[in-house]
Image (cartoon, rainbow, N blue to C red):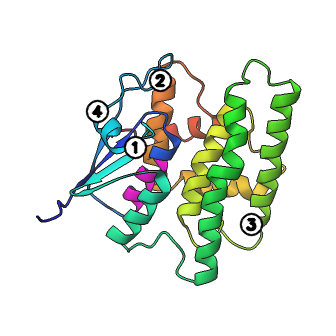
Amino acid sequence: MATPAHFTLYTGPLSMFGAKAEIAALEKGLQFERVMVAYDSARGYDPKHPEVLRVNPKRQVPVLVHGAVEIFDSTQIFEYLEDLQPEPALWPREREARALARLLEHKSDEVYFPHVIRLMGLQDALRGDAAQAAIGAATGYYGEMEAQLADRPFLAGSYSFADIAFYMAALFGERQGAPLTAATPRLLQWRERMTQRPAVRQVAGTMAAWLRSVGRPVPVFLRGAMSTMQVV
């Protein structure tokens, strides 16, 4: 059986990981159907989408279905998209830079983002010790990424999945009380370069519009760019 030209990506209006996968697909110019799974501020993803439940035992988005291929997890989806459409490459071509990009993509999810997750449950106590410790750890990570940008425009040299991953993770950090500041000027400039990319602008714009529609704050750096975003 021939593999269909289009794939289906199941994501959600506030899915950081789904947004990562969608940006990557758009950067590669791939044709796909985006299924925005129902999400409610109080109940979360309820009811669960039957295709998400069928494919992912963790019961979470994103999920990608492409003919016989049924996968979940944004990193696995990244890898599949790179195989599906090698150009433009979103892993660096050089071995060492590619290894660095993979490491930074992983660290965005597993080293940086846990601090943001902790802040999600501490929004009423951001001045408390636990929240301040999480903010301090996130801020320390920003310093590491600032150093990565000392002699390059993107985190691993060329634009890559590492940039997509950290951009979305840091967007959530901004929302939860761990913003970027003037202490990391190169990182602020990097974020502006990222926001101006059409694929990033489209996906972040959609998320910003959803936040605004339900009365949630939109990060300042996205509000300023809303007029130029293609919101779908």
Q: Position of residue 175 (x, y in %)?
A: 65, 33
Residue span colored magenta: 19-27
Q: Nearer the viewer, mark 2 or mark 4?
A: 4
Q: Nearer the viewer, mark 3 or mark 4?
A: 4
Secondary structure category for the residue under label 4: helix
Label 3 amino acid? Gln
Secondary structure category for the residue under label 1: loop
Classify residue 24 as left or right of residue 68: right
Is 114 contained in the magenta span? no
Residue holding disc 4? 50
Residue holding disc 1? 230
User: Badge 1 local density, few (<14 within 10 Å), some, or many (20+)?
Assistant: some
The Cα–Cα distance between marks 1 and 3, rounded to whole angstroms, is 30 Å
Q: Earlier in the sequence, mark 3 or mark 2?
A: 2
25 in relation to 91, above or below: above
The Cα–Cα distance between marks 3 and 2, rounded to whole angstroms, is 36 Å
Residue most extreme to the front: 57
Residue holding disc 3? 148
186 in relation to 215, above or below: below
Secondary structure category for the residue under label 3: helix
Of residue 53 and residue 129, the one placed in the foreground of this image is 53
Number of the label disc, if any, that sits on residue 44: 2
Secondary structure category for the residue under label 2: loop
Residue at (40, 43) in percent of width and height: 230
Classify residue 97 as left or right of residue 134: left
Q: Earlier in the sequence, mark 2 or mark 1?
A: 2
